[in-house]
Image (cartoon, grey):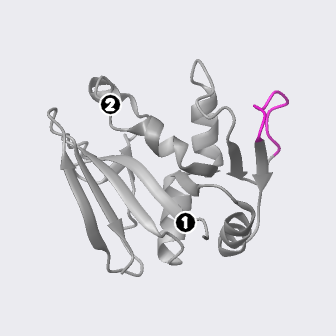
Amino acid sequence: MTARLRLYAAMSLDGYLADAEGGVGWLAPFDAQDYGMQGFLGGIGAILTGRATYDQVRGFDTWPYAGKRVVVLTHRPLDADAPAGVETASGALDDLVARLKAETAAGDIWLLGGAAVAQAALAQGLVDTLELFVIPLTLGAGIRLFATEGPGAAWALTAARPFPNGVVELDYHRP
């Protein structure tokens, strides 16, 4: 079975991944709820992320992706003490995704972000599933998940799951 490219992300009700400063602190009030992240990570064989997202995650107290292959899309070298399993890649996104799908024997590929990588993958039709956690806040400005211009696509809803705190999980796949 071929690995799928899964865009799994939290976004504000008005479509933002991050606030105007690029931060995700607005998600903190919703951290107490279990959204199934451990089960999701159990089905992931590789993580694809952009450089800004990688740098942001490196600022966390602990590296949350220990034991996972993490591919950072960047032209710049990583920090000397990058976590085990982290590598860089550059070049055409469609070629990289095809290579990762061929190399990922167990599990799927999580498209962690950031927005530029997600928007490019969506525009090129590379994303197989969208797993979105809509947070009941409007930010008014920030970094959007979806580009304001570009090709559209049809998606089929496969699941909708509300949580007691107002968060709604929406899962889609390409028909």
Query: Above or below — where is 65 with respect to 10?
Result: above
Identify the element where label 1 is drawn. loop
**Residue position for label 1:** 4
Furthest residue in direction front, as rendered: 1
Residue 34's mark? Answer: 2
Crowding at label 2, few (<14), some or many (≥20) Cα neighbours within 10 Å? few
Furthest residue in direction top, as rendered: 61
Residue 148 position in % (x across, y down): 35, 68
Q: Is residue 142 visible?
A: no
Which residue does the image show at 71% across and 45% down from the upper left? 69
Query: Above or below — where is 135 with respect to 148?
Result: above
Q: Earlier in the sequence, mark 2 or mark 1?
A: 1
Residue 24's mark? Answer: none
Task: Give the CA separation, mark 2 to mark 1.
Answer: 24 Å
Judging depth in this view, the residue of 63 and 14 nearest the camera is 63
Relative to 148, is 45 on the left or the right? right
Q: Main secondary structure of the magenta part?
A: loop
Which residue does the image show at 73% across and 53% down from the upper left? 74
In magenta stretch: residue 78? yes
Kindly identify the amino acid type of the residue bearing the numbered disc 2: Asp
Kindly identify the amino acid type of the residue bearing the numbered disc 1: Arg
Relative to 124, is 32 on the left or the right? left
Residue 136 position in % (x across, y down): 18, 41
In magenta stretch: residue 168? no
Q: Which residues are magenta?
A: 77-85
Relative to 52, is 153 on the left or the right? left
